[in-house]
Amino acid sequence: MAETPKKQPKREKRTTDPTDSERVSQVTQDLRKSENYARTTQTRNSCVSKDSRSYHMSEEGLRSITVRKYKATTNSNHPYNVYANLLEQNFQATAPNEVWMADITYIPTDEGWLYLASIMDLYTRKIVGWYIDTRMTKELVIKALQRALNNEKPTGRVIHHSDRGSQYASNGYQQLLQEHHFQVSMSRRGNCYDNACMESFHSLIKKECIYPNRFRTRKEAKQAIFEYIECFYNRKRSHSALEYVSPCEFEAAYYANQRKVAA
């Protein structure tokens, strides 16, 4: 005689702390509903469990955006001089304007490609200079460097690290570096990990700004990139390497401490 199947106990309806929902909602608004859920609550130092984060993001129609693979933008086959890797993947600095990292990435639009050249300060993780153009030329990276110099006005000798691409190795770019007394450092051929900080930033801007949007015009893309870098990333976006404050906040704290020590 077959056993009568036992009734399954009723599952209790999931109950959640409404403050969790409020926290997640506010944080995701701050991060434009695109930052990975595992980091959302870190920005406000609030304690919300992984399951609770996933649940509330699902309730609000939010999801984590994964990074897509993208084509390489480095051409190392050129006649220019290349330089040794001074960093050797030691991504540490003790003050602003000690080490600058540089790289290029691409942005798709309905009108065609755009290329973004960015320069990051290794200590603050701030994007100190950037430029967008329709062609990936030496002028693209030169203009990004000129912006960084105008913004930061470094007084010491800065290490400039980039890949071995023809734009960075070009005579025009190297001449500008020499005029401002930079020490030149370059990644090993074909090793993206040697420039991991810049690779990470460009991966981030694609995940949070480029992939969630379809840019119908180049002008629209340029405006979005400007707002992301200048209004959001530098000033508002928390960074795990900076104890979860923004690059500008971290930089301000450094200089405030320097003034305090000097007083």
Image (cartoon, rainbow, N blue to C red):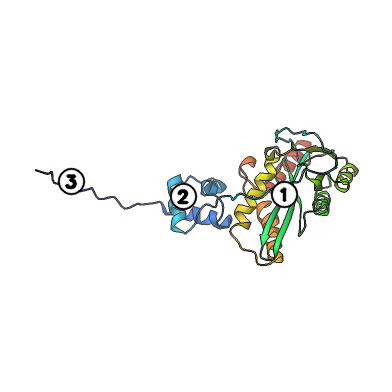
The answer to whether mark 2 and mark 3 are in CB contact below 8 A is: no
Q: Residue at x 64, y 52 (%)?
A: 205
Describe the element under mark 1 as helix, strand or loop: loop
The answer to whether mark 3 and mark 1 are in CB contact below 8 A is: no
Question: Which three-letter amino acid code belongs to the residue tagged 3?
Answer: Lys
Q: Quadrant of residue 133?
A: bottom right
Which label lies toward us, 2 or 1? 1
Q: Is residue 87 above or below residue 49?
A: above
The answer to whether mark 2 and mark 1 are in CB contact below 8 A is: no
Q: Is residue 250 above or below residue 110?
A: above
Residue 166, horizontal then vertical, whole percent: 81, 46
- Which label's residue is closer to the chain start, 3 or 1? 3
Residue 82, horizontal then vertical, whole percent: 82, 38
- The quarter of the image holding the C terminus is top right
Report, in whole angstroms, how far the alpha carbon at label 2 lies from the one at label 3: 34 Å
Q: Residue at x 71, y 64 (%)?
A: 218
Report, in whole angstroms, how far the alpha carbon at label 2 lies from the one at label 1: 36 Å
Describe the element under mark 3 as helix, strand or loop: loop
Q: Which residue is mark 1?
A: 73
Give neighbour class at mark 1: few <14, some 14-19, many 20+ (Cα, 10 Å). Answer: some
Q: Quadrant of residue 232?
A: bottom right
Q: Is residue 189 above or below residue 6?
A: above
Q: Residue at x 88, y 40 (%)?
A: 181
Q: Is residue 206 visible?
A: yes
Q: Which residue is mark 2?
A: 53
The residue lying furthest to the left in this view is 1
Describe the element under mark 2 as helix, strand or loop: helix
Give neighbour class at mark 2: few <14, some 14-19, many 20+ (Cα, 10 Å). Answer: many
Q: Which residue is mark 3?
A: 6
Q: Nearer the viewer, residue 62 or 252?
A: 62
